Amino acid sequence: MASYDPRYLAGVLFFNAQDFFEAHEVWEDLWSESHGDERRFYQGLIQAAVGLFHFGGGNLGGAAKLYHSARDYMRPCGPRFLGLDVDAFWRRMEECFRPLLAVGPADRALRPDPAVIPVIALDPAPDAWPDPEEYIGDDG
């Protein structure tokens, strides 16, 4: 068991529920206070979440750009960071984005296959999970 920032965990819960907008909102708050590799890591997670949000909403050009920039942000963090198997996460993201990356944004009907959208698992597991609803902003 491990202790993580509850905002990180709340974002993980939103991400795993495929509520990518709320995941990005929670992580953005955490990102603004971070430095170094942690800042890059959170930026990568934020952009991965927003990329999936755009992919699901049909903004395929934006989704593809964010896929690449998110990966670039997380690359220096190494294969494991803050309990996340970064390599496994990106293998799953690549599987999810493969149809978009193969055909490009021209196929406007293309959407991510929910069965291959990554799920974030942390190892070690957190000591406790927060109530993610506590991290939704006043406008949420």
Image (spheres, helix red, strand yellow):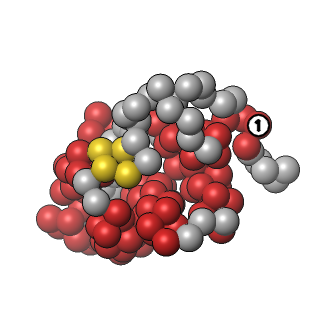
Which residue corresponds to mark 1? Answer: 134
Residue 137: image x %, image y %?
A: 78, 50
Give above or below for 8 relative to 102.
Answer: above
Amino acid carrying mark 1 in the image: Glu
Residue 51: image x %, image y %?
A: 42, 61
**Residue extending farthest front:** 2
Residue 59: image x %, image y %?
A: 43, 66
Residue 48: image x %, image y %?
A: 41, 59
Give above or below for 66 relative to 119.
Answer: below
Near-viewer residue (102 or 3): 3
* Left or right of 101, for residue 136: right
* Left or right of 17, for residue 95: left
Q: Which residue is drawn at 66% across and 30% down?
A: 130
Q: Which residue is drawn at 31% across and 50% down?
A: 80
Q: Residue at x 51, y 41 (%)?
A: 12
Q: Which residue is drawn at 56% across and 36% down?
A: 3
Near-viewer residue (5 or 7): 5
Give above or below for 86 relative to 70.
Answer: above
Label 1 crowding class (10 Å Cα cut-off): few <14, some 14-19, many 20+? few
Report if residue 113 is visible in the image: no
Near-viewer residue (88 or 126): 126
Report if residue 106 is visible in the image: yes
In which image quadrant can residue 52 be found?
A: bottom left
**Residue extending farthest right:** 138
Secondary structure under the numbered disc 1 in the rendered image: helix
